[in-house]
């Protein structure tokens, strides 16, 4: 099998995995209607069935502890917006620095991966600061953890990266060296289907 064939094979779920994931996503959708008022599962389900690679990405979000759920609908793009809605930063995506450049710059005690590399391999994107703030309007997330967010190029160029959390009833945005990593910091992803 070619490398391309191997990569493609990895990004498709079996029928059993697909059914299991759809059952989990529907149950979460039904339980949290306040996150997506006015949206119907049948329409979301139809979009998911037409996008096997996006289903694979959602499965990766679920597998790493993100508990993805629909948080909106982009009318212009005709796409449902899924976001990690786990109470804390997804457990399977913590202890990572910001990006590949930061990972390679570390001389000692390198983390296993970077947030940007993981997101890319999963087929998702890190939340922007605005998307993170919008998510916090749907509940209280990251009350004990923090999550890397997309960092503007001018900050990244100087070696920094941004992360957010929710404390004292407010969203806080902080900076750190992009090469830093902590057991309580991961990242949240977003996916349009």
Image: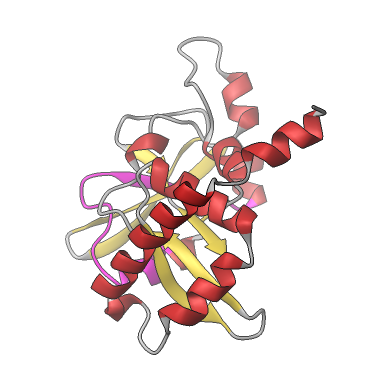
Q: Where is residue 180 in the image (x, y as percent from the top left)?
A: 45, 28
Q: Residue lying farthest top?
A: 108
| Residue drawn at x 61%, y 46% as measured from the top left | 12
Quarter occupied by residue 169: bottom left
User: 123 and 136: which one is in front?
Assistant: 123
Q: Position of residue 130 (x, y in %)?
A: 48, 67
The region drawn magenta spans 132-152
Residue 163 as seen in the image, left or right of residue 28: right
Q: In which quarter of the image is the N terminus?
A: top right
Q: Position of residue 38 (x, y in %)?
A: 39, 90
Q: Residue lying farthest bottom?
A: 38
The answer to whether any part of residue 10 appears in the image is: yes
68 in relation to 29, above or below: above
User: 94 and 9: which one is in front?
Assistant: 9
Q: Where is residue 19 in the image (x, y as percent from the top left)?
A: 44, 56
| Residue drawn at x 55%, y 66% as measured from the top left | 48
Quarter occupied by residue 3: top right
Q: Residue lying farthest left?
A: 168
Q: In which quarter of the image is the C terminus?
A: bottom right
User: 51 and 65: which one is in front?
Assistant: 51
| Residue drawn at x 54%, y 45% as measured from the top left | 14
The answer to whether any part of residue 149 appears in the image is: no
143 in relation to 97, above or below: below
Indicate whether residue 134 is drawn in magenta: yes
Indicate whether residue 129 is drawn in magenta: no
| Residue drawn at x 27%, y 52% as measured from the top left | 142
Colouring: secondary structure
Report the number of numbered marks: 0
């Amino acid at each position: 099998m070619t490398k391309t064939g191997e990569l493609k094979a990895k990004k498709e779920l079996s029928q059993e995995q697909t059914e299991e994931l759809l059952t989990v996503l529907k149950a979460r959708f039904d339980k949290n209607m306040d996150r997506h008022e006015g949206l119907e599962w049948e329409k979301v389900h139809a979009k998911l069935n037409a996008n096997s690679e996006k289903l694979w990405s959602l499965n990766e979000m679920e597998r790493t502890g993100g508990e993805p759920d629909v948080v909106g609908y982009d009318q212009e793009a005709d796409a449902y917006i899924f976001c990690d809605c786990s109470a804390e930063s997804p457990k399977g995506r913590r202890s990572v620095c910001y990006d590949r450049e930061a990972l390679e710059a570390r001389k000692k005690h390198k983390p296993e991966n970077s947030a940007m590399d993981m997101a890319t391999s999963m087929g998702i994107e890190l939340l922007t600061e605005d998307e993170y703030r919008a998510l916090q309007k749907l509940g209280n997330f990251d009350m004990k953890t923090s999550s890397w967010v997309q960092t503007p190029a001018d900050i990244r160029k100087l070696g920094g990266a941004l992360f957010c959390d929710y404390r004292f009833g407010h969203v806080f945005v902080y900076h750190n060296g992009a090469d830093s990593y902590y057991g309580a910091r991961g990242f949240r992803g977003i996916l349009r289907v």
